[in-house]
Each structure stands twice: as structure tokens, then as C-alpha cells.
Image (cartoon, rainbow, N blue to C red):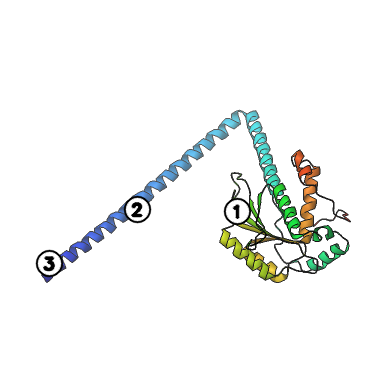
Amino acid sequence: MARTTAASRDRRRRIVRRSRADRQHYLMQLALAWVALVLLVLGLLAWLIWQALLWLQRYPLVGTALWVSALLVGLLVAAGVFYWTFRLPPPGLRWRHPNRAGLARYYDQRGTLQDLQAMEPVEFERYVGRLFELEGYRVEYTPRSGDGGVDLRLRRPGRGWRAHAGGLALAQCKCYGANHSVGSPELQQFSGAMRRALAYEGYFVTTSFFTPAAQEWAQQEGIHLIDGLALLHWRQRLQRRIRLGLFLPGARAAFDLPAPEGDDGWQW
């Protein structure tokens, strides 16, 4: 009985070794086939390029036309990339701004932010929602009670190559005075709401400023911060785009953007 058991065990080991050897042999043949295919494709491409160069030497005028066409296509692609990048909402704060609180108070004293800070919370949410609508988002306003730390649910229509096209983004809006900062606890609550909703992107918009701890938390969580000064810059950028005619004719009537008080061409 013991001899039979040992013989069957040896037989199983030989079968396992043979299957491993066959698998290694198959993988080796597959790798060689892939290498041969890659070399064949590279050789074919090299031959085609060589023939194209010979043909261009025979017909130099055609070569010049092809180079000009390639340059025009490159310029069109660059213009398209610039245009779609220009349409995106401002990314907000990506690093610390130590003097940002002082700048916010300064512009508040000039009256630049007073028209925004005087809004009711619901009015400010609608205001920010219209800004996102002008940027191409579909905006859904959450109920006032039990919103879970989220004021706006945003979706951008799919545009082919754009990452996360059609995905869900969230926005939180806080209409505060210049002396009322946004701290990390509010950012932590917002990031928790993003995880629960499986949102790929988040925007925290306020009329005041963010504390350094809040900025660090947002940088770790990938949340876009838009404080009072960035919000003014966003509004001015939309005004310029309206003047340049980059919106449909009904956009100006649908959302009238008032000029900031004391606007002297300041750029952020």
C-alpha cells in the first residue's frame, strides 16, 4: 500500500513538472512570435518611411505642401487645447498664499466683495451655480435641509477625450465675511461627502479665505479652493468672454454679471 501511494505521488510530480515545462515552452514560443511580429512591423514602417522620403525628393513641391498642412493642423490642435483649457473653471488655490487673508480684507474695504458677501446663502448658491452653468456644467441644487455638506451637484457633458467626461462633481458654497475664514473641519466634511457620492472632483467656494490647515487638507484630498479673490477673478474672466462673444447670445440675458466696484484692471 505504501509503495502504491509513493508511486502515485511520483507520477503526480512528473505530471506537474511536465506541465510546467510545457507552459514555459509555450510562453517562450509566444514571446518569440511577438518579437518577430514587432520586428516585422518596424521593418515595414522603416521601408514605408524610406519610400516616402524618396518620393518627396522626386516631388519637392508636394513635400512643402505636406509640411505646411502639418503645421496648420498643429496650430489648430494647439488652439483647440488652449480653448478647452480656457473654458475650465479656475482650479483655485494649489499652494499656500500667506497674504491672501490681508488681500481679502483690503478688497473688502474697497467694496469689491461686498456685493457678494451681502447675498443670502441660497442666493449665493444660485449665483455660483450660474457661474458653473456658463462653464458648461449641468447644475443640480441640493435641498436646504440634509444636504450632507453639498450645495451643488455638477455634471459636464461628455467631450470625448476629456477625462471624467460626464462624471459627478460636487460644490460647497459659503457666503462669509472677510473676517470669517474657512477651516479644515469644513473641508473634512466636504471630502467625506465626496467619498460617499463617489465624486471625482470637488469645489469649495467662499467669499472669504481659507486657513493654511484647510489649504493643506484640500491639497491632500484634491479639492479645488475658490476664495473671494479667486471668485472675483472668475467673474472678471467670464465678463471678458462675454465681451469677446464666446457665449451664446442668450447667455448675457440669462446671467447678467455686474462689474465689480473699483475694478481697475486688477489681475489675479
Q: Secondary structure at mark 2?
A: helix
Real-space Cα separation, disc 3 to disc 1, in angstroms: 65 Å
For residue 76, what is the image quadrant? Answer: top right
Which of the labelled discs sits on residue 168, or is there none? 1
The 10 Å Cα crowd at callout 2, few under 14, some 14 to 19, many 20 or more, is few
Image height of 268 relative to 242, above or below:
below
Name which residue type carries label 2: Leu
Q: Is residue 131 left or right of residue 154?
A: right
Comes first in the chain, label 3 or label 1:
3
What residue sits 69% from the left and 68% below the top? 214
Percent from the top left, x then y, of residue 35? Answer: 41, 48
Comes first in the chain, label 2 or label 1:
2
Percent from the top left, x then y, of residue 179? Answer: 80, 69
Percent from the top left, x then y, of residue 7? Answer: 15, 65
Residue at which label 2 appears = 27
Residue at which label 3 appears = 4
Q: Secondary structure at mark 1?
A: strand
Name which residue type carries label 1: Leu
Name which residue type carries label 3: Thr
The 10 Å Cα crowd at callout 1, few under 14, some 14 to 19, many 20 or more, is some
